[in-house]
Image (spheres, rainbow, N blue to C red):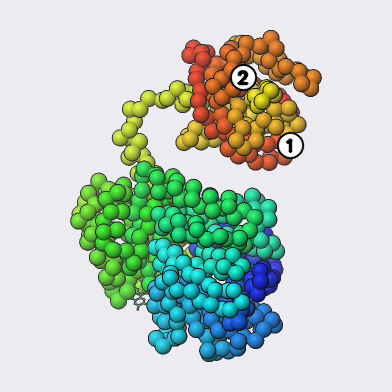
Amino acid sequence: MQTNKPRDVQVLPIGTDTTVMRSRSWTRLRFEIEYALAKGTTANSYLIQGDKIALIDPPGETFTEIYLQALQQRFNIKDIDYVILGHVNPNRAATIKALLELAPQITFVCSNPGAINLRGALENQDLPILVKRGEETLDLGKGHNLQFIPTPNPRYPDQLCTYDPQTEILYSDKLFGAHICGDQVFDEGWETINEDRRYYFDCLMAPHARQIETTLDKLSDLPVRLYATGHGPLVRYGLIELTHAYRQWSQQQTSADTTVALIYASAYGNTATLAQAIARGITKAGVSVESINCEFADPEEIRNAVEKASGFVIGSPTLGGHAPTPVQTALGIVLSTATNNKLAGVFGSYGWSGEAVDLIEGKLKDAGYRFGFDTIRVKFKPNDTTLQLCEEAGTDFAQALKKAKKVRSQTVPASSVEQAVGRVVGSLCVLTAKQGGVSSGMLASWVSQASFNPPGLTIAVAKDRAVEPLTHSGNKFNLNILKEGNHLGLMKHFLKPFEPGQDRFAGVAAEEAENGSPLLTDALAYLECSVQTRMEAGDHWLVYATVENGKVLNQDGVTAVHHRKSGSHY
Ligand SMILES: Cc1cc2nc3c(=O)[nH]c(=O)nc-3n(C[C@H](O)[C@H](O)[C@H](O)COP(=O)(O)O)c2cc1C
């Protein structure tokens, strides 16, 4: 981690009349769960110089000075006509105020909820603002006739994407970003940042996956060449894959059978930060979250979410000795909707007295709800420790729900696939695969179960193995688990060197499984597998495969295990 580098602004032309300015922080920016991987981040701002000049998303106040310097070196700030805001963050107020001092003629462009936030943040009700609801365009000249797509969600109810048909760039605000800082402006070699993108999605998008699906639908008709994101690398090379991944990850959330309704309000963002950490803890444990910002949700939406959910969590700040009115209304809906077998949780940020949290907890206790975690009270802004507490509380909550569900469905017997997977642990196996005319087999003892749902396992395959080319993503293979007692013959057979092209199955009892790969009929069990992904692990590939079919061939036998003398070579 390059923690000693100073913050700076990286500037690069990215399209006709268009420049990106990436304000870079090499260290963790602030205490929010989304920054927990601590890889720094960039706050990306964009400049479009048509006949009119528009600036998109100036950064927060930690960058105000260096950002204005970078702008001033390139053009006259006094010439800016528009500042477009993908969302309004109180943290941006300092930069916006500084811009206004230099260029008082600026007109702001944002969504309707954005305009309300902006007027509040700048304490100026008379700001010139063009409110964009979706149909209106903004012509900057030279072909930059900007379109606007409101993409609200509970965390950013004012989010607005901007599309420039001249450059086919979509300014996607929070969408498709990642919190990583580096010299790379675009996402070439994007596979290496997949994990960061997924983490960012899990923190910021997963708790409102339903709205993300709506957003993806809205954006699907636009011919986009580049996602100009609010954070991290701009998405050019992996654009199709990332869009597809967002769809898939959202669907995983919306189709989950256990959900938690996470209902909150937050005037200054602190309770929202706690909500995000709790949501992360819940989704991490495989339970989905439907988050609801009750300031922007109608009663029907709250009622539906609570009815559908197995549990609910309510968060509120204390303002003037009370919970804000939208929270009180939501609490009323919850009390009249949620049967008291649903699990409950309460959290909130406060300053000195914290009556809101006490009130909510008291009412839920009186109504007889069980609590999935001890009520969380955080004074003002959360820090590292309180965020971790929230995340762990979320995970506990989800685990309690899963446990309750398991108790209800305990009588389901193990399927034949599950029984066969159960033979895998520590086992000695032969991996067999066939593609076209090529078949191959390899003795494998570095096999481990990796997931329950779907059933999946990992196998370490040495990079120099003949079978290696048959274990790429999408390939099918069989894993034949050997039986103690008759394994030595098969083990010796598959350990002996083969000539290139030699039939590896000559003299071995084998038939073809449904997936076309050889099945060793003397094995204890076999699994038909499909490779999902693989990771480079030194001189091996660690292959993750899901099990699509499988069977125990010998019910009385036990799994053969290979006891090695050394971990350096088998
Ligand atoms: C106008 C105002 C009134 C407040 N009243 C109270 C109060 O009565 N009791 C209390 O404990 N904190 C009070 N606070 C502190 C807030 O609860 C605290 O700032 C909290 O972090 C806000 O959470 P939020 O960022 O989610 O809105 C008040 C803050 C403001 C700005």
Choose top left, top right, bottom left or bottom right for residue 487: top right
Which dot marks residue 539? 1
Tags 2 and 1 in contact by the CB under 8 Å rule? Answer: no
Residue at position x 36%, y 39% in the image = 403
**Of 516 and 525, the residue lying toward us:** 516
Q: Residue 320 placed where, x, y %?
A: 30, 76
The quadrant the N terminus occupies is bottom right
Three-letter code for the amino acid on which mark 2 is drawn: Pro
Residue at position x 33%, y 68% in the image = 295
Instruction: Residue 30: tell me if it is visible.
Output: no
**Of 18 and 351, the residue lying toward us:** 18
Which dot marks residue 518? 2
**Of 251 and 337, the residue lying toward us:** 251
Residue at position x 46%, y 50% in the image = 250
Query: Does ligand 1 reach within 8 Å of label 2's beta carbon?
Result: no
Earlier along the polypeptide chain: callout 2 or callout 1? 2
Instruction: Residue 37: tell me if it is visible.
Output: yes
